[in-house]
């Protein structure tokens, strides 16, 4: 009898992370990806309007993202993430013009909150104690019910931090998910919250080296191979329907379904998944940043939230951006550029730009949606789930997607 095959549906980060773990093992690994390319919501592409390669959206990681870093180490791409040697975040308040740096110290005891040069200006050490309430065990509740939503610290730190981490207004975001992010990063000290960015692009870091690694280990990947339906019998998945062709599965074959929640819900009978989403808007401007501009800056009291400076462009991320979906791209580009020009002090008219509105960027990280996330197991013995929307305990992030892929791979590896 031939070797059993593990079929992985979806070559986003969850599917790729599972494939990298399983390739070279006792099962043949075959990936089926609907698009012409791998990477899903985390990839680079050549943008004709700008004439350069950009990422579909700016992605920020923190050094405490251990699954993501292990994945990069496994595909030989750890050096693709760059960031300052210590946790160091530049900020600007667009309403007052104030600029500051947030610099948590490396170790777990947070003495940085006692240092006016390291903490948020206008705050006192006592203000930070409020965060302890979020870390206490208790039932899941909106962050807004656990942390005070007023005051300088909220406006200048907790709101931007949790909005970025949850892609959901913290007022309604899940306190369990927010707390998990803090536990894995800030609560472990500055060593675990250095900001990291893929300077040469998401594909150069997360996707292309994974595809090389998979090909080296004999894994196969079929692009433009959209799974339309799964056949089930006797409590197992037993066939794939790809439009006009049907692929029967052998008795030892296994499946990792690593597609977005709405697709998984349509393929697996009775599967409950998150079903409400939040948008992210990214704006890219083809213009070199000023020489001494930091690679990343948090902005408060503006439309823009995070400004990324790459050698050939300035890029802006706006999370939880559903309110902007109906604003025209031209209006958005003008409005966003006015703020970017103020922050960077570049006195130039609107440069070539691109606006990308990702309507379903992530599931809404609310208490109700978090409850709808399934674990990796399904009612079918040979079918497991992966994806940032499964019950990873984290919001929809690179770390969550990769962790889900690692868990799914572990489950498959443990099957006899
Ligand atoms: C604009 C934006 C900014 C973001 N910023 C950050 C950030 O700063 N930091 C961070 O950590 N995270 C960020 N994220 C979240 C991160 O990108 C995602 O959590 C992660 O990429 C999800 O990976 P995934 O594999 O779970 O899903 P996906 O990337 O959605 O992958 C699913 C794959 O399945 C394929 N597929 C779908 N249907 C089928 C089918 N029927 N058959 C076969 N294949 C199919 C899709 O084409 C896709 O390739 C951001 C996301 C967006 C959109």
Image: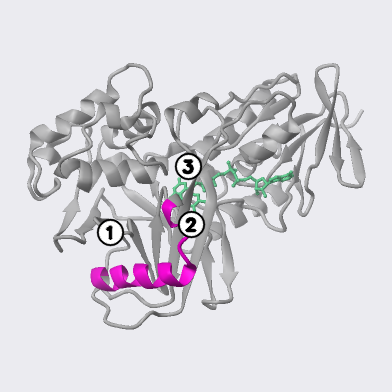
Quarter of the rendering containing residue 311: bottom left
| Rendered residue at 55%/27% (across/down) | 373
Nearer-N-terminus badge (1/3): 1
| Rendered residue at 71%/23% (across/down) | 270
Residue that mark 1 sits on: 302
In the image, 392: left or right of 285? right
| Rendered residue at 43%/76% (across/down) | 286
Q: What range is drawn magenta here?
A: 323-343
Badge 1: how crowded within 10 Å, few (<14), some, or many (20+)? few
Residue that mark 3 sits on: 397
Q: Is residue 131 above or below residue 260?
A: above
> Is ligand 1 closer than 8 angstroms to the Cβ of mark 3?
yes
Nearer-N-terminus badge (2/3): 2
Label 2 to label 3: alpha-carbon separation: 21 Å
Residue that mark 2 sits on: 325
> Magenta-highlighted stretch: main secondary structure?
helix
Q: Position of residue 377 (x, y in %)?
A: 65, 22
Quarter of the rendering containing residue 332: bottom left
| Rendered residue at 45%/35% (across/down) | 365
Q: Is residue 336 magenta?
A: yes
Q: Position of residue 88 (x, y in %)?
A: 24, 52
Label 2 to label 1: alpha-carbon separation: 17 Å
> Helix, strand, or loop for circle 1?
loop
Nearer-N-terminus badge (2/1): 1
> Helix, strand, or loop for circle 3?
loop
Label 1 to label 3: alpha-carbon separation: 24 Å
Q: Position of residue 197 (x, y in %)?
A: 41, 55
Quarter of the rendering containing residue 162: top left
């Amino acid at each position: 009898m031939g070797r059993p095959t593990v079929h992985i549906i979806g070559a986003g980060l969850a599917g790729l992370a599972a494939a990298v773990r399983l390739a070279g093992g006792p099962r043949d690994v075959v990936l089926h990806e609907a698009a012409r390319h791998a990477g899903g919501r985390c990839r680079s592409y050549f943008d004709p309007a700008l004439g350069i390669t950009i990422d579909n959206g700016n992605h920020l990681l923190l050094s405490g993202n251990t699954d993501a870093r292990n994945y990069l180490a496994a595909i030989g791409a750890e050096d693709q993430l760059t960031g300052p040697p210590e946790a160091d975040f530049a900020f600007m308040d667009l309403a007052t013009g104030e600029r500051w740096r947030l610099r948590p110290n490396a170790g777990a005891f947070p003495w940085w909150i006692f240092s006016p040069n390291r903490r948020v200006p206008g705050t006192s050490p006592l203000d930070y104690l409020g965060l302890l309430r979020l870390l206490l065990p208790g039932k899941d509740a909106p962050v807004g019910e656990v942390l005070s939503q007023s005051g300088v610290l909220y406006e200048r730190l907790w709101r931007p931090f949790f909005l970025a981490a949850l892609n959901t207004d913290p007022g309604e975001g899940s306190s369990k998910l927010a707390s998990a992010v803090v536990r894995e990063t800030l609560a472990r000290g500055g060593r675990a919250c250095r900001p990291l960015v893929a300077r040469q692009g998401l594909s150069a870091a997360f996707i292309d080296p994974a595809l090389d690694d998979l090909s080296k280990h004999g894994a196969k990947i079929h692009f433009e191979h959209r799974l339309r339906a799964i056949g089930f019998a006797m409590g197992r998945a037993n066939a794939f329907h790809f439009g006009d062709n049907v692929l029967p599965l052998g008795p030892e074959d296994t499946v990792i379904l690593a597609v977005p929640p709405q697709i998984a819900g349509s393929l697996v009978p009775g599967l409950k998944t998150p079903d409400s989403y939040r948008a992210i808007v990214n704006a890219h401007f083809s213009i070199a940043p000023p020489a001494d501009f930091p690679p990343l800056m948090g902005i408060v009291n503006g439309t823009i939230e995070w400004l990324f400076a790459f050698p050939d462009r300035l890029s802006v991320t706006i999370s939880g951006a559903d309110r902007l979906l109906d604003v025209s791209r031209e209006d958005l580009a003008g409005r966003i550029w006015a703020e970017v020009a103020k922050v960077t002090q570049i006195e130039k008219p609107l440069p070539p730009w691109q606006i990308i509105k990702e309507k379903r960027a992530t599931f809404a990280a609310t208490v109700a949606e978090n409850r709808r996330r399934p674990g990796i197991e399904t009612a079918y013995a040979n079918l497991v789930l992966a994806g940032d929307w499964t019950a990873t305990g984290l919001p929809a992030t690179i770390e969550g997607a990769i962790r889900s892929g690692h868990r799914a791979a572990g489950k498959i590896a443990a099957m006899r």
